């Protein structure tokens, strides 16, 4: 099959639509996106089911392909722990996005959109036995149709976005044959563990997550480098965009002795922060999509600048409603769109001047050191997560019966947002009269993050990566992605300082770096804002606005092998704005 990269290498980007075989072309490519008039707020906000472990897998997993599969942690006194086992099917299914649309063919994990939610624990020695905080092994079966119609490629690889895991289980984007072709050029790419790769319909793949604090391999556990809201999604080279858009994404939530998922305080008393939990801890993935008159998903495979839809979907439903009691709720918001950026407000009515205040408690790098109190909006770039707590019992909601989560950021193309304007309500909150007892709270101290020290930064390797447009595609330091040519060789457990520069003019690039969380040191030579500032926040995706320069530092701990970093405007990623770095043993 002629791929995006093959078209690019032949210099045939403009003519690509005419050259690709029919099954790889865009679906309904010549139809302008119809503006379907769908009644908002008639469907309830759905929630994906929680995934439960299975007792066994057949055949049994092979520990030999995983790093630290049976690792005894002598520092924390942890014996080898057998993993919790999960099983997930990637399947084609019918999904109803709106009451007035027929069922639409999607690809989903266990056939749902979004996929089932993982809820796992990562805790220290004193508490791990109580909650069975064990490693996790997930077997993904590829049951997607080999001879499908429309967009998407049924060869898949799964990335656990924000996780600290081995390359084999990180969703390395190439197919196994592509990776094998690198071996003669770079032995350290493979020794002693190969990266994982894409797998075809009829096959399965085991992903393994030790769920141990970064630094465990050399006795320096960073207990503050813990995620809260991760997500998992397809990561196939050249075709991540269509596969994620078609439905291959879900939540992976991590709890511990501070963020316990128990607002009553009975679990881990003395450490439990008692954040809103259970039915009051609500993950929300926001996406934009387009449909034809028959309710079929529309997607343009050759929109290399960034695909935008014109219908707004929350947890797989177009503009749903959610009934809330008058108490505190924790909302975990994920931008799961391919290219759209959101600026989100809570308003009393669409485009109302009356907006409500709330607290931000987390980014994609987990809980902040301290909440950012009393904000009334935030920006959310592709792949970023922001967690907020809204107290619907607050006097500001007195007499209010409906509140709207509203996007007021205008965007007409993949270049990026155009500024604030008329808003589009994404989700309606219907405030009930119920005022239940509310034991939850938002403490002034969440998870303390120490700034990366001058001693850690002294003498470290510095690198600069420039993100730019080149010949109708997207490049890093003037190069398109080459899985066999790492741009950096980095010794394991080293610290480096990177300068990320946007040299593509007015384009926006949300840059995601795999393996570890990022300390943001400066933005355009200035102290970063609180929601990304080192000492208060960690990040795994950092946006580069037009002509931005951002300095970051991070550690390459524990695992060896190849990882990638890339723009998370997924069309930019698919059109070559990705690079490989290799972490090697010393």
Image (cartoon, grey):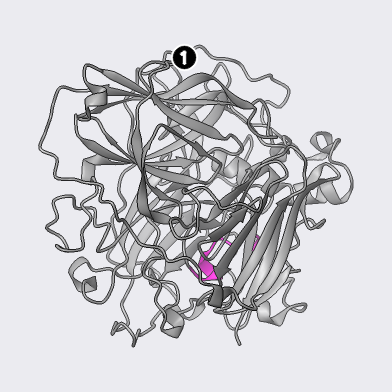
Toward the viewer: 584 or 532? 532
Height in image: 501 above or below 307?
below
Say whether residue 435 is left or right of residue 206.
left
State the image quarter where residue 401 is shown: top left
The residue shown at (58%, 83%) is 192
Height in image: 23 above or below 583?
above
Secondary structure beneath dot 1 equals loop
Say whether residue 440 is left or right of residue 92.
left
- The single residue placed furthest to the right in the displayed view is 11
Toward the viewer: 398 or 288? 398
Height in image: 536 above or below 68?
above
**Crowdedness near tag 1: few (<14), some (14–19) or many (≥20) residues, C-alpha within 10 Å:** some
Specify start and end residues of the magenta stretch as a single range.
Answer: 165-175
State the image quarter where residue 112 is shown: top left
The residue shown at (53%, 76%) is 559
Q: Position of residue 408 (x, y in %)?
A: 52, 24
């Amino acid at each position: 099959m002629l791929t995006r990269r093959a078209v690019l290498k032949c210099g045939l980007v403009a003519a690509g639509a005419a050259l690709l075989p029919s099954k790889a072309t865009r679906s309904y490519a010549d139809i302008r996106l119809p503006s379907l008039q769908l009644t908002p707020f008639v469907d309830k906000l759905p929630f994906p089911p929680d995934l439960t472990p299975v007792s066994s897998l057949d055949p049994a997993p092979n520990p030999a392909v995983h790093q630290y599969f049976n690792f005894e942690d002598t520092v924390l006194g942890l014996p080898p722990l057998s993993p919790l086992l999960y099983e997930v099917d990637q399947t084609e299914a019918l999904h109803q996005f709106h009451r007035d649309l027929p069922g639409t063919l999607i690809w989903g994990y266990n056939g749902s959109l979004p996929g089932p939610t993982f809820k796992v624990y990562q805790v220290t020695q004193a508490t791990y036995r109580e909650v069975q905080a064990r490693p996790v092994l997930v077997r993904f079966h590829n049951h997607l149709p080999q001879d499908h119609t429309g967009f998407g490629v049924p060869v898949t690889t799964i990335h656990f976005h924000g996780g600290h895991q081995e390359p084999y289980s990180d969703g390395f984007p190439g197919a196994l044959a592509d990776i094998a072709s690198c071996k003669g050029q770079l032995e350290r790419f493979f020794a002693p563990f190969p990266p994982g790769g894409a797998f075809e319909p009829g096959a399965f793949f085991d992903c393994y997550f030790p769920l141990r604090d970064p630094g465990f391999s050399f006795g320096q556990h960073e207990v503050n480098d813990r995620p809260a809201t991760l997500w998992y999604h397809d990561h196939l080279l050249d075709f991540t965009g269509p596969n994620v858009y078609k439905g291959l994404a879900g939540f992976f939530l991590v709890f511990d002795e501070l963020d316990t998922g128990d607002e009553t305080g009975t679990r881990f008393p003395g450490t439990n922060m008692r954040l809103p939990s259970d039915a009051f801890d609500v993950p929300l993935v926001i996406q934009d999509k387009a449909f034809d008159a028959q309710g079929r998903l529309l997607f343009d495979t050759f929109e290399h600048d960034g695909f935008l839809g014109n219908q707004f979907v929350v947890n797989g439903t177009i503009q749903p409603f959610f009934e809330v009691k008058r108490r505190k709720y924790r909302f975990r918001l994920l931008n799961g769109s391919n290219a759209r950026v959101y600026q989100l407000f809570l308003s009393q009515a669409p485009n109302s001047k009356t907006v409500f205040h709330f607290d931000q408690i987390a980014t994609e790098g987990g809980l902040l050191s301290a909440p950012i109190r009393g904000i009334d909006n935030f920006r959310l770039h592709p792949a970023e997560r922001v967690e907020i707590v809204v107290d619907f019992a607050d006097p500001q909601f007195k007499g209010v019966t409906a509140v709207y989560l509203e996007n007021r950021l205008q965007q007409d193309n993949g270049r990026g947002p155009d500024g604030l304007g008329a808003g589009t309500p994404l989700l309606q909150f219907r405030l009930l009269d119920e005022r239940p007892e509310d034991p939850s709270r938002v403490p002034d101290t969440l998870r303390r993050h120490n700034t990366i020290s001058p001693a850690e930064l002294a003498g470290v390797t510095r690198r600069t990566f420039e993100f730019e447009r080149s010949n109708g595609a997207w490049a890093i330091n003037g190069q398109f992605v080459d899985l066999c040519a790492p741009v950096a060789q980095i010794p394991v457990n080293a610290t480096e300082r990177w300068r990320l520069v946007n040299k593509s003019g007015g384009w926006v690039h949300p840059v995601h770096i795999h393996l570890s969380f990022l300390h943001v040191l400066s933005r355009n030579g200035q102290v970063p804002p609180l929601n990304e500032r080192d000492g208060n926040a960690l990040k795994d995706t950092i946006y580069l606005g037009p002509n931005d320069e951002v300095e970051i530092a991070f550690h390459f701990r524990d695992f060896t092998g190849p990882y990638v970093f890339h723009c998370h405007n997924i069309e930019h990623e698919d059109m070559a704005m990705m690079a490989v770095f290799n972490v090697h043993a010393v």
